[in-house]
Amino acid sequence: VLAYLDDQRLFRQLAYCNGKWVNGDADTPVMNPATGEILGYTASLSAAQVNQTIDDAQAAFHLWRAESVETRAERLMQWHDLVMDNQHDLAHLMVLEQGKTLREAEGEIAYGASFIRWFAEEAKRVYGDTMPSHIPNAHLATLREPIGVAALITPWNFPSAMITRKAAAALAIGCSVIVKPAEETPFSALALAELAERAGIPAGVFNVIMGDAPMVSTQLCQSDKVKAMSFTGSTRVGRLLLEQSAHTVKKCAMELGGNAPFIVLPDMDIQQAARAAIDAKFQTSGQDCLAANKILVPRDKYQAFVDAFAALMDELEVGNGLLPSTDIGPLISSRAVDKAQALVDDAIAKGATVIGGKLNPNLGENFFAPTLVTKVTPDMLVYQEETFCPVAVVIAYDDLDQAIAMGNDTEYGLAAYVYGNDIRDIWRCLRGLEVGMVSVNSVKMTGHPIPFGGVKQSGLGREGSRYGIDEFSEIKYYCLGGL
Ligand code: ADP
């Protein structure tokens, strides 16, 4: 790892609790998914250490919330600048532990940093309301207050930005946070802690803990001192955390799975649609909750689309994310490869046709060739599930209502893509799709100004935008009577 870094102190293997780097009970190895090599170890904390961190974060919260918003914003801006100054090192650390391409990793660091700047600015403009009084001789108004200690549990597909998108909102409004990164990608989180410390974010305000995930989560959920639970990950784990958080009635923000439809409208240019669908499908090797999961194409253009998509897919280079020629890195684990293969096998067994992309046989066991599945029917797992791998699914539709119905035929409701020109068709999709985000004629949809989040079982709450602060704050109403 150290050979790739300009600043070797960004490679941290200990947990960061209350401003100290601490050892745990045991060490957990972290693998490079591209090579299978062990990159390093992280400290696995005990339940007592987790609880101590919660107590310290609670104490730090009272000091941090009492700072002026200007001071908090300055600390955050410094953190932002340090993240961008170290973009090269942070991106390399991410490629090593996550596998994505260096280009994608650099993009994620900039994307993640943009939330820090956004919320540093946004926190200065969090206003209350005054209401005309229905009570004689009274003044009615609201304040917005930080909720308290926030637990942030984050996934391995975006190891840096899923932390900053939550933490920046929480810190800006005056909360302290305890981050529990995914065990696959702790080093990106720990490097953020190192930079937060250098930015002068006080001890106990930004903590990064690791350990057995169910144990750590149980401690966080059961603690009455933890007031908010913000999670990004699978719907399965999200449900578990909601259940566990019920006991202490925490405010929960959940960014869960997606099953994004990509609707090609009848008047869309097929080459352009295929190019966009490739981009919307294969980013982060398809391990993205925004990935285009079901590509829906008018029946009379179906074959032309499949041919165009297959030709573009064939150009994609699969390999180690550190090589500039690589378009698609490895999957996170061999378990993810087995799951991808099981989806394809299920589709073939049920009558699908599969077109495989290129894969150099010398690559390690975590690589999976980009794959196109056609002749898909609703009984196949690739139709029903979030694939979370580089397997593209193209389905023909006869009329737009059917396309929208197929797009909605899932428990998820995160995002959708619509490609075409006719404004009436676009509007029908916009209104008909049961999702939190619709992107028309653009693969890129996310960023600091927009409310990111889903409906149905894709989650609760929104991240980024002016709404992102809601998850970490409470409205306090007051009535000044007898005036
Ligand atoms: P994936 O299946 O894509 O790895 P998960 O939802 O399992 O996604 O993981 C996201 C986060 O949830 C990670 O930080 C992981 O450690 C955590 N996690 C996984 N299993 C559990 C669990 N049983 N209880 C609490 N947290 C968990």
Image: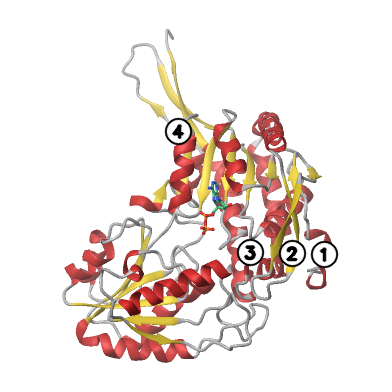
Q: CA distance from mark 4 to mark 2?
A: 40 Å
Residue bearing mark 1: 7
Residue bearing mark 3: 109
Question: In front: mark 4 or mark 1?
Answer: 4
Count residues near mark 1 (Cα–Cα under 10 Å), then give few for <14, some for 14-19, many for 20+: few
Q: Position of residue 478 (x, y in %)?
A: 45, 20
Q: Say whether marks 4 and 1 touch (CB < 8 Å).
A: no
Which quadrant of the figure has residue 177?
top right
Residue bearing mark 4: 246
Residue bearing mark 2: 86
Q: Amino acid at mark 1?
A: Asp
Q: Secondary structure at mark 2?
A: loop
Q: Secondary structure at mark 4?
A: helix
Q: Say whether marks 1 and 2 touch (CB < 8 Å).
A: yes
Q: CA distance from mark 4 to mark 1?
A: 43 Å
Going from N to C along the chain, the mark reached first, 4 or 1, is 1
Q: Position of residue 418 (x, y in %)?
A: 31, 71
Say which of 386 and 132 sits in front: 386
